[in-house]
Image (tube, rainbow, N blue to C red):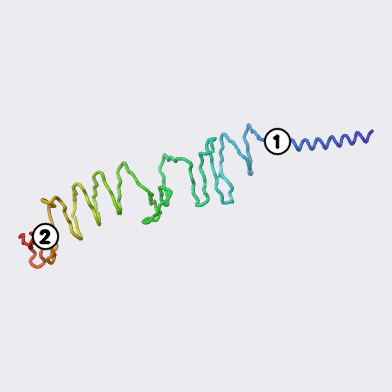
């Protein structure tokens, strides 16, 4: 009888241990709600999803594996479609939606607007700006350096206070120059058939040899007698 009682105690103890281990396993793998603060001096590892109403740290906050090269996401709201992502290759932050910056945005390298394109004339250092497609500016554009353009259309006035160099410039309206106009080639006025006029306060001619006449009214300064000659349609004629 005594042996039976002893065996019964041993069996009860074993069952108690097994049930305790089972309950602990359930507690570990089930969801845990903590109503107070968690203070840890070491590492807190969460393999599943952690939902926090507020999170703060006095040190660094690591998102993802601190040693491996991987892509990490920080999600917002409950949909899972609004996020900030660290893309390890090529090494950039990606946003799923718009980014609005209230303060000033600065860059030690440059700004690239667009998802493609080919940079040909700048090196994207020191604050360069590259725009893949069109750029619209409602206010003023101030340029202290050089402007290079393949083709430009200005709907309103274009005011240039400094020098400008162009290989080909046309206008359907008037062209005003507040300073000197220097032409390495020809200046041609293509007005109507009855009148083609260029009005200037001062015209400077460089002495040259007699050119081949092209149109009536073409003039040049003779390099031998320094007189103004104009073509009348059949021959060169002295104006003075």
At x 19%, y 58%, the residue is 183
Is residue 187 found left or right of 231 in the rendered image?
Answer: right
- Residue topped by disc 1: 27
Quarter the N terminus occupies: top right
Is residue 168 found left or right of 80 in the rendered image?
Answer: left
Mark with earlier residue (1, 2): 1
Q: Position of residue 46 (x, y in %)?
A: 63, 41
Q: Position of residue 113 (x, y in %)?
A: 40, 47
Q: Position of residue 12 (x, y in %)?
A: 84, 34
Say which mark, if any, is on residue 175.
none
Q: Position of residue 155 (x, y in %)?
A: 26, 44
Quarter the C terminus occupies: bottom left
Q: Residues within 10 Å of mark 1 (few under 14, many from 20)?
A: few
In the picture, residue 184 is in which quadrant?
bottom left
At x 13%, y 56%, the residue is 203
Residue 199 seen anywhere in this rendered image of the structure: no
At x 18%, y 59%, the residue is 186
Q: Residues within 10 Å of mark 2 (few under 14, many from 20)?
A: many
Is residue 197 found left or right of 46 in the rendered image?
Answer: left
| Residue 180 against residue 211 in the figure, above or below | above
| Discs 1/2, front | 2
Q: Alpha carbon of mark 1 to alpha carbon of mark 2: how far?
A: 102 Å
| Residue 195 against residue 49 in the figure, above or below | below
- Residue topped by disc 2: 219
Q: Nearer the viewer, residue 198 or 164?
A: 198
* SS under mark 2: strand
* SS under mark 1: helix
In the rendered image, the residue lying farthest to the right is 1
């Amino acid at each position: 009888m005594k042996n039976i009682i002893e065996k019964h105690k041993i069996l009860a103890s074993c069952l108690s241990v097994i049930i305790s281990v089972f309950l602990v396993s359930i507690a570990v793998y089930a969801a845990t709600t903590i109503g107070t603060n968690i203070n840890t001096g070491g590492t807190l590892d969460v393999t599943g999803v952690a939902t926090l109403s507020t999170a703060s740290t006095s040190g660094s906050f690591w998102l993802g594996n601190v040693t491996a090269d991987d892509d990490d996401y920080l999600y917002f709201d409950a949909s899972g479609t609004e996020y900030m992502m660290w893309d390890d290759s090529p090494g950039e932050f990606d946003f799923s939606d718009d980014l609005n910056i209230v303060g000033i945005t600065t860059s030690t390298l440059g700004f690239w607007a667009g998802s493609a394109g080919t940079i040909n004339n700048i090196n994207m250092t020191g604050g360069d700006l590259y725009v893949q497609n069109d750029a619209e500016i409602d206010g003023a554009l101030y340029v202290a350096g050089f402007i290079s353009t393949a083709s430009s259309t200005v709907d309103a006035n274009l005011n240039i206070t400094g020098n400008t160099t162009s290989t080909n410039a046309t206008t359907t309206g008037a062209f005003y120059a507040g300073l000197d106009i220097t032409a390495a080639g020809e200046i041609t006025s293509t007005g109507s058939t009855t009148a083609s006029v260029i009005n200037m306060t001062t015209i400077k001619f460089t002495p040259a040899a007699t050119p081949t006449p092209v149109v009536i009214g073409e003039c040049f300064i003779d390099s031998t007698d320094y007189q103004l000659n104009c073509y009348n349609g059949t021959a060169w004629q002295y104006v003075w």
